[in-house]
Image (spheres, coloured by chain):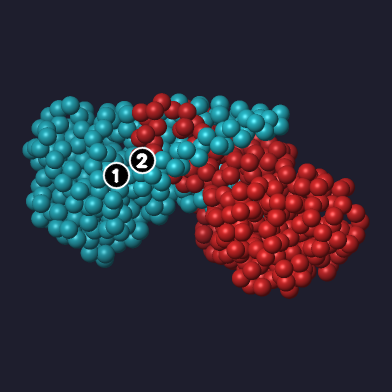
Chain colours: A red, B cyan
Amino acid sequence: MIEKITIIGMGLIGSSLARNIKQHKLAGTLIAADRDEAVCEKVAELGIADIVTDDLARSVEEADMVILCVPVGAMRPVVELIAPHLKDGAILTDTGSVKESVIKAIKPLCRSDIEIVPAHPIAGTEFSGPESGFAELFDGRWCILTPLPETSIRAVEKVTQLWEGCGSIVEIMDAKHHDLVLGVTSHLPHLIAYTIVGTANDLEDDIKSEVVKYSASGFRDFTRIAASDPTMWRDVFLHNKDAVLEILQRFTEDLTALQRAIRKEDGDYLYQRFDETRAIRQEIIDQGQD
Amino acid sequence: MIEKITIIGMGLIGSSLARNIKQHKLAGTLIAADRDEAVCEKVAELGIADIVTDDLARSVEEADMVILCVPVGAMRPVVELIAPHLKDGAILTDTGSVKESVIKAIKPLCRSDIEIVPAHPIAGTEFSGPESGFAELFDGRWCILTPLPETSIRAVEKVTQLWEGCGSIVEIMDAKHHDLVLGVTSHLPHLIAYTIVGTANDLEDDIKSEVVKYSASGFRDFTRIAASDPTMWRDVFLHNKDAVLEILQRFTEDLTALQRAIRKEDGDYLYQRFDETRAIRQEIIDQGQD
């Protein structure tokens, strides 16, 4: 148990974390901070924190651990605001989907006694806001930590215990490697889903209504992904730009090759490509990730 | 009830249809035909048809209705084989995912007394073969009929009753329009899913194993779609070439615009595009299609 934990940002992730911390008694006192007064009111109403405040600077003053659950683009301004108020030796962790740029943004703002433990719980839904959170969100899901070379083992252990307390399975990884892997598994799929749903959204109204009607034939699966929080995803793409553009380039080349095969009616090439992809699905099933 | 029905092609769709016809007693006699002996043996073992044969020509000789459940590319050779053996006034229907090219392929091969009722049940899974079929597959799902101008109302009614008997909701549509709508809702999503899974499949082995491990972050949803039958999908793209290339062109333009916005760090454009797509998700939920 950690004596005092402050969560900054009470959206889906922050509020789910708060529910866990309360339910599993992972903190002596839990402080929930959000700059949005309406969010604070909602959190107070939900009763998922001991103290609720919109004063971010004051919220961290006595915290042993501060968890940033704000969009990746908001990490820097939030840390600018709170850094002078952090307690000596406090652990500063986050839940952002991009790790290298967050480290670059916040590290120069922190004193050397602050223990930075970047973290990324691989969990989420397409819903946003404190009322969308739930305690089971992290259950059985990965949480990746990307500690800095100077982060102490004690701090890494504390953050590990917190996430294990929420039901997660913790993995340690290099920040740059994290951004590449998540670029493939999460960021590119989201970009593609947003694109295809956007393409459909631009169609003439009569066709669009039929696209909705017959969406179960494949399209529907993309709309769920493309309903995710636009601020969060804007920030992900801006902050993992290099990895996303690199993997997007490969994707575009592969799509162009399939497009050419359709145009040239090269059935053998299409069959071969469509047949190869079954193996990866089987591996996902074999590893219990489906 | 129809006296004699022959199903040709006993894969996922054909075998699910057979299970329905038996269970709901929609035919006096059900004949299952497949050119693959191993499939015939499996079907006989499953006991989902009254007669099982690999002799396609003979299988249709006394049938009042013949249902083609083969890949779109196999429609022409199958109809070439069976057309001379069709009973006077027999109803010839199918379950292909593309309608215009199937009509073009089979109509010239049929005598004028044959009632052609092209059909497309919007249902499926990523599994193939007679053992993957199940009776509930069509329950509450759309089935689109695209009858020809010369098709009799009686024939359309018979096919409608069959699909309603399987639990489907039947809609009538123009074949060309069907191919455009399904190009957007089904064919493009499948092409994109095959592409993204193929791109991941081409990655170095160490990254690929992590892509599988962390697939729940978005990628996994694409692998299910990309595990669909490669022969079926090869044929869909070859036979709905024009509509697919047209909608793919729009998709590529939209993706290029997002790529440029990431490169130029145009957060406003990204936010706007990501925000627009939420509406279509809401419509899908409102219409109970989620």
Is residue A12 among what the camera can see?
Answer: no
C-alpha gap between disc 1 and disc 2: 8 Å
Quarter location, residue A173: bottom right
Q: Which residue is mark 2?
A: A214
Badge 1 vs badge 2, beta-carbon distance below 8 Å: yes
The residue type indicated by label 2 comes to: Tyr
**Residue shown at the point (27%, 39%) measured from the top left:** B144
The residue type indicated by label 1 comes to: Trp
Instruction: Provide the chain ID for the residue under circle 1.
Output: B
**Residue shown at the point (57%, 37%) measured from the top left:** B274
**Residue shown at the point (79%, 63%) measured from the top left:** A63
Q: Which residue is mark 1?
A: B142
Where residue B227 sits in the image (x, y, percent)?
47, 50
**Residue shown at the point (55%, 55%) measured from the top left:** A131
Where residue B200 sits in the image (x, y, percent)?
61, 47
Label 2 element class: loop
